[in-house]
Amino acid sequence: MTKLGPQPAPKGPGKDGPKEINHDGDHVALDPIPPRISDQPETEYLYNKVTKYLNGSKIEFNTTEGHEYINIQHGNDVIRMTFFEDGNIEIIQEDGDRLDEVSKDFETIVGETHSIEANARTSKQKSYKNESSGRSSLSAGIAIVLESKKIILRGNVEITGDLIVRGNIKGDGNVDVRGEITADEIPGRENPNFVDYGNEFDTPDDFDTSPLRLERGNTS
Amino acid sequence: MRINVTNKSFGIIREFDSYELDLIRRNNFIKTPKHLIIKKYPEKTVDPFEDERIRLSDNFYDSDFIDRKLQEVNTIETRYDDDTNNFLEFVPHIFSIKSIYDNLQRLCLEVMEPVFEISGKKPFIEKGLLFKDTLANVDVDSFFGDQLQGNAVVFNFKNDKNDLIFDRVLNYINEFSLFDRLYVDRTFKKYQRPTIMVSVNDKRRGVVDAVRRN
């Protein structure tokens, strides 16, 4: 009869056993992803504890005075998260996507500037509110499209450039014009740019015809 | 058409005193030159602010004839209806964008470009493409039907003293363009100037009529 007992203790460091690095004073702990916003910290042996695994993933606790940081870095050398002495946190992904999934509220509070830079941004929501206590500006290289059943502008509106209205213009107040008004309906005046978009659908032109004989050969 | 060319009209030509050039009316529409073949038709919108117009011929663009949105693909479009704050859902034009652009291009090559060449300027286009969402109660074989398909245009010339340009252009179209209907409106009741209404389609009947308005 065989007695089952605990497995014998492993001998040696083992396949995944942690290995202490930096014992020879090399300062490569944060490489190959250098700091982005913080200064390159220094490390001093005995004060920088690094646990590194076979695939290169590592966890660092650097307690070198004035250069303390905590770093978690994947062995693929494209992802790391670092907490620096100066209070900065860097989460770096040099490749790969990222997802923050929250089932309830998600709040971001920024004391100073919040900058987002992207090739394209998409935002989908049921309602959207954007408040500024000062000035807001919206600019685009080609066009800004506001699309809604109804667009309400509250306040005075100043337009630099042409205004094309595909519909009627109606107002409750006066119309004050410093320049000239031209319209097709004013006799003797002509507005070459005026296009009538008023009707939903076009209707046939109402006219009769009678045969017309044009003289041939008169082209000059 | 017969054009007399003499050394007075072409001063540097001295090899002959007069030359008679006979231009023959074609039987087929002008073939679209390679550089004008439309590679990408618009998907839904003709935007007056958009810089990228589609060239139909050397001197004419889609925006010369089309002044509104024709089709909608993905979203529901509404437009302001009246002062009761009601909005109507966007309804697409009955004809496809591709057929309209192809027809307009044929119209440009057959009529508008020669008109430009002869008059030396772009005519004032009173009406280009017209818009409708259904063909109910519409006679497709009518000038209005052609206007809905992009087969017809209504134009005249500003500052045309004694109608010289108008007459020249009218005679050219009458003799050399493959048109279906050519209406001449000298009534001054709808338009301020003598106006040409011309349609180009496969029927090519060459009907020439004067417009009468009550």
Image (cartoon, coloured by chain):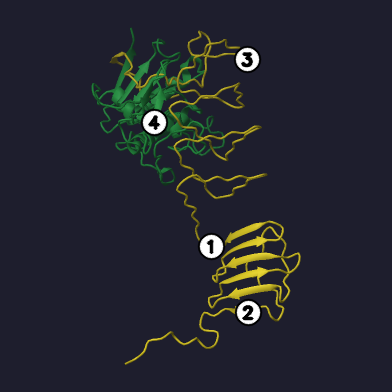
Chain colours: A yellow, B green
Distance of label 2 from label 3 (alpha carbons): 82 Å
Query: In this view of the protein, can residue B132 be seen by the observer?
Result: yes
Q: Chain of mark 1?
A: A
Q: Which residue is the site of mark 4?
A: B77
- Expressed as whole percent of the image width and height from the top left, the position of residue A43 reads 72, 71
How many residues crowd around disc 1 within 10 Å: few (fewer than 14), some, or many (20 or more)?
few
Distance of label 4 from label 1 (alpha carbons): 40 Å
Quadrant of res A90: bottom right
Q: Is residue B136 above or below residue B62?
A: above
Q: Residue at x 50, y 56 (%)?
A: A98
Q: Which residue is the site of mark 3?
A: A179
The secondary element bearing badge 3 is classed as loop
The quarter of the image holding the C terminus of chain B is top left
**Disc 4 marks which amino acid?**
Glu
| Upstream in sequence: badge 2 or badge 3 | 2
Q: Which residue is the site of mark 2?
A: A20
| Upstream in sequence: badge 3 or badge 1 | 1
The secondary element bearing badge 4 is classed as loop
- Expressed as whole percent of the image width and height from the top left, the position of residue B35 reads 44, 45
How many residues crowd around disc 3 within 10 Å: few (fewer than 14), some, or many (20 or more)?
few
Distance of label 2 from label 1 (alpha carbons): 28 Å
- Expressed as whole percent of the image width and height from the top left, the position of residue B186 reads 39, 13
Say if labels 4 and 3 share a chain.
Answer: no
Distance of label 4 from label 2 (alpha carbons): 66 Å
> Marks 2 and 4: in contact by CB < 8 Å?
no
Which residue is farthest right? A66
**Disc 2 marks which amino acid?**
Glu
Q: Chain of mark 4?
A: B
The quarter of the image holding the N terminus of chain B is top left
Say if labels 3 and 1 share a chain.
Answer: yes
Q: Which residue is the site of mark 1?
A: A95
